[in-house]
Image (cartoon, coloured by chain):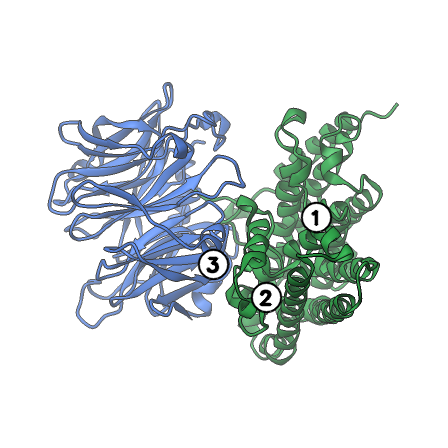
Chain colours: A green, B blue
Amino acid sequence: MRSPPTLAAALLATALVTAVAVGPVPASAQAPSPPPIDPQAAAIRVAERVLLPGYDDLAGATAAQEDAWRTFCAGATPRDAATLDDAFDIAADAYARIEPVRYGPVAEDFRYERLAFWPERRDAAGRALAQLEGLPDESLLAPERFPDTSVAGQGFTAMERLLYEEDTRAALVEGGAREARLCTIGIAIAHALAETSGEIADAWRDEALPALVADAQEGRRAATRLATDLLSGLEAIETLKLGLPLGESLDDARASRAEMWRSGRSARQIALNLAGLEATARALVDEDAALAPDTLRYLAQAERLAAQGPADIGEAAADPERRGRVLLLSAAIATARTAAAGEIPPALGIVTGFNALDGD
Amino acid sequence: MAIDRRSFLAGIGAAAALALSGGSARAGSPAVYVACARAGDGSQRVCGFTGEGRLLFSTALPERGHDVAARPGSDELVVFARRPGDWMAVVERGSGRVTRVVLAAEGRHFYGHGAFSADGRVLWATESRIETGAGVLGAYDCAAGYARIGEVETGGIGPHDLAFLPGTDRLVVANGGIRTHPETGREILNPGALAPSLAVLRPESGEVEEVVELGPDLADLSIRHLAVAGDGATVFGCQYAGDPLAVVPLVGVRETSGRVRLLEMPEDDLISMENYVGSVALDPSGAILCATSPHGSVAAFFERASGRYLGRRRMSDVCGAAPGDVAGTFLVTSGNDGVAIARVPPGDLADLGAELAGMVWDNHALRL
């Protein structure tokens, strides 16, 4: 009989041992030697292989989602929301693949928060939606003014609530007093997502990538930031996406603290985050598995667990029978992060930032 | 962890150290800053650099450092080990040369911050009485080779930053409330019962004149860092150790009258700070304050007198903050995005270039 918590404990122990093994070496033992990989070239590869195609996909999928909303809302009620569901799934998939990246144009103009606002502190997205629904006039929902509203109401987090919260979904499908305003809000969010995604894709192509190619220092800085994004992306999955629903103990578990639990996408988001991070790691080391063998192996392992484990991370975290699988995934991600922290920065000859991970 | 003195001193000899020409206060010369950082080879360092991005010295430290204090009327700087460290290093501000290292007293550890008396005679360092967790200020006689000459209690546990109120012999101390033990490193030993406070005390007599707490709703809001204006108004930055999804105020001001108020921010902006302020600083005029959040990668700005929020700027992993060269400017440092000058308003950032961008800058920066 399988015993998940024990497995998880064993994996955690492995992670701790690895952490010791890859800890900082004394300064005296260091000798400056060129890194195996040129950091500028590594950053350019990530941009060309992962980020440009990733943001293009996102721009395309969010534009298609906007079309789906316009078509859906033009139809008579009652109507089938399956087209909206499909469009949302495709767009959320594209988002999850590049979500951990915080370097580049996504960092400007608070676009990162505009794309999604999670975790939802103080029910921010829910309150933003309620506020939009209660606006006396609709002018704030016009495309040119919508970016001035709360960012919590502009992205995937608000869209998911609008589409999958029972009462708003029912109003959208069946019609009634709230239908017209909810449609206007849905179209406004879908449009804002498409705008933001398109801006990021354009800025990468026209500005950010040329800057990386032209300037070795910017390339080096980009490699440092991308490696940091890899590590903090794994940390965020562990501490927020899994840690929040898991809580400190079974008694403390909270199913509704999982990301996108309403649409049942909590595990899928994590699996695609991991796929995107693996693609980033592969591009950084130019597919040379010998430079980051543990990182690539443990990322693949975590990805497999996320894809094959419970789809409903929140419910599973609160279920004594299945909680072990969520703990196991968390431990697998910690293992991958430890491996990446030990392998990726030295391969690029860089050091990664640590104030956010280890402040005081 | 004990220091291997010999390897530390050998490291000192090998440290790259360029002499600063003349004093930092010379008219027309750019501002000079000191901060701890990790270099590209992984070594821990204390670095001096100009506000124009030129590295002046980079000296190896035995372990990660935290804050730096400058001794008035002398060329000495003191670098404190990061909590719960057990050493401080005295460094020449011109050359970066380490002249001595001072270990924590038996049964005490440092919290990473210290403050000199205005006459430069006594250094007060925040410390913990390991056995009880009580916060104390260790007193060090600078002229006597930093001999430890006594200690006073801080009126709370987990004291972190501290500063003298200008023109007085009164210290304001941020009692963070977090209890740790060297054996368990940085693990919080009293979660849910932090009891943070801001204390005003006279260190020479040990008299605690005032202890301000933020109330039961904010009992998990650890007060950690301070910046004091010329008129004595004290800005403080906090870190929240309670429910990670709660949203609480993170920046406050203790007026010269003793009144304490917490500053408001628009909710989106406050949420983006992720319940964590890593440093606070005042601009050279004392009128504008900056609070950084490395978790949120945000530097936020306020008008100090009115408390009015002036907006925020994104900088990856930003933490260190210090006054800039002229009114309305700050120097800000990052673990992975170099060093920049922020100008307020509008809050644009001017990067200080590649030489500094190659370092992983730690939590704080000091303007000399």
Give residue A167's mark. Answer: 1
The disc, 2 or 1, on the residue closer to the chain's N-terminal end is 2
Quadrant of the rendering where the C terminus of chain B is positioned: bottom left
Q: Label 3: how many residues lie within 10 Å, few (<14), some (14-19) or many (20+)? A: many
- Determine the secondary structure under disc 3: loop
Check the residue under mark 3 and report the chain it is in. Answer: B
Q: Mark 1 touching mark 3, by CB under 8 A?
A: no
The local crowd at label 2, few if under 14, some if 14 to 19, many if 20 or more residues have their Cα within 10 Å, is: many
What's the amino acid at mark 1? Asp
| Residue at 71 percent of width and 30 percent of height | A318
Q: Position of residue B128 (x, y in %)?
A: 34, 27
- Measure the alpha-carbon separation of dots 1 and 3: 52 Å
Measure how far apart labels 2 and 1 are at the Cα level: 33 Å
Closest to the observer, B247 or A125? A125
Q: Is residue A233 visible?
A: yes
Provide the residue designation for mark 3. B359
Q: Is residue B170 left or right of residue A253?
A: left
Chain of the residue that carries numbered disc 1 in the rendered image: A
Q: Position of residue A313 (x, y in %)?
A: 74, 39
| Chain to which the residue tagged by mark 2 belongs | A
